[in-house]
Image (tube, rainbow, N blue to C red):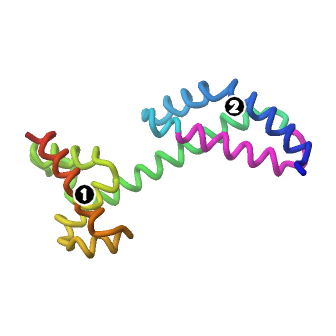
Amino acid sequence: MSDPNVEQVDARFQDFYRDHFVLTARLARMLTGDPDAADDLAQDAFTRVYRYAQNADSTIENPAALLRTTTTNLCRSWHRSKKRAQLRMVRHGADDASLIEWERELDDTLRRLPYDQRAVIVLRYWLGLTEAEIADSLDCRPGTVKSRHARAMRTLRKELS
């Protein structure tokens, strides 16, 4: 048996989502400058508001304001996380200013690779791991490492030529 209160919340929330998603995604995009991250952050904001609504003892007075605040806070966290990642890159690698043009181009191209392909390339050429060690690190089969490596190298050759 389903709880009638949950069904009411779900129906109202579906309407709320439909009415506010575009504005929330636009807000996140303006705050992050990244359309892909914005959609993810907007989804996350709705998820958090939904969970809060399910656990709240009373009705939320202004759900749109709560959604805006949640979205803003998530975007702030996204920026902090991105800044920490940049600081780690500077700490553990060469800074952008010290790279020559082809190194910067390679770095940019690597960043555009899907994570699984980028991980194989970095583990292979930066850390010098074998296929078996990479497979163990990524919790996949050596054949998967080979195919990811081949796709990544094909993309790198194409983009860097």
Q: Is residue 20 magenta?
A: no
Query: Where is residue 147 drawn, in percent x and y?
Result: 25, 57
Mark 1 or mark 2, which is nearer to you? Answer: 1
Answer with the quarter of the image where residue 60 lies.
Answer: top right
Residue 26 position in % (x across, y down): 54, 27
Q: Decide whether the magenta segment is chiefly helix, strand or loop.
A: helix
Q: Position of residue 30 (x, y in %)?
A: 49, 29
Instruction: Classify 10 Å Cα crowding around label 1: few (below 14), some (14-19), many (20 and above).
Output: few
Place of residue 89 in the rendered image (x, y in percent of width and height, measured from the top left)? 30, 57
| 14 with respect to 32 (left or right) | right
Q: Amino acid at mark 1?
A: Ser
Residue to which mark 2 is pinned: 17
Label 2 CA crowd tier, 10 Å (few <14, some 14–19, many 20+): some
In the image, what residue occupies the spot 30% across and 62% down?
Answer: 144
Q: How many marks?
A: 2
Q: Residue at (24%, 66%) from the top-left corner?
A: 123
> Type of residue at label 2?
Tyr
The quarter of the displayed image where residue 4 is located: top right
Q: Disc 1, disc 2: CB below 8 Å?
A: no
Closer-to-camera residue (13/69): 13
The residue nearer to you, when weighing 106 against 124, is 124
Q: Which residue is mark 1?
A: 147
What range is drawn magenta here? 40-59
| Residue at figure coordinates x 68%, y 27% from the top left | 18
Give the secondary structure at mark 1.
helix
- In the rendered view, tell whether residue 13 sits above or below residue 144: above
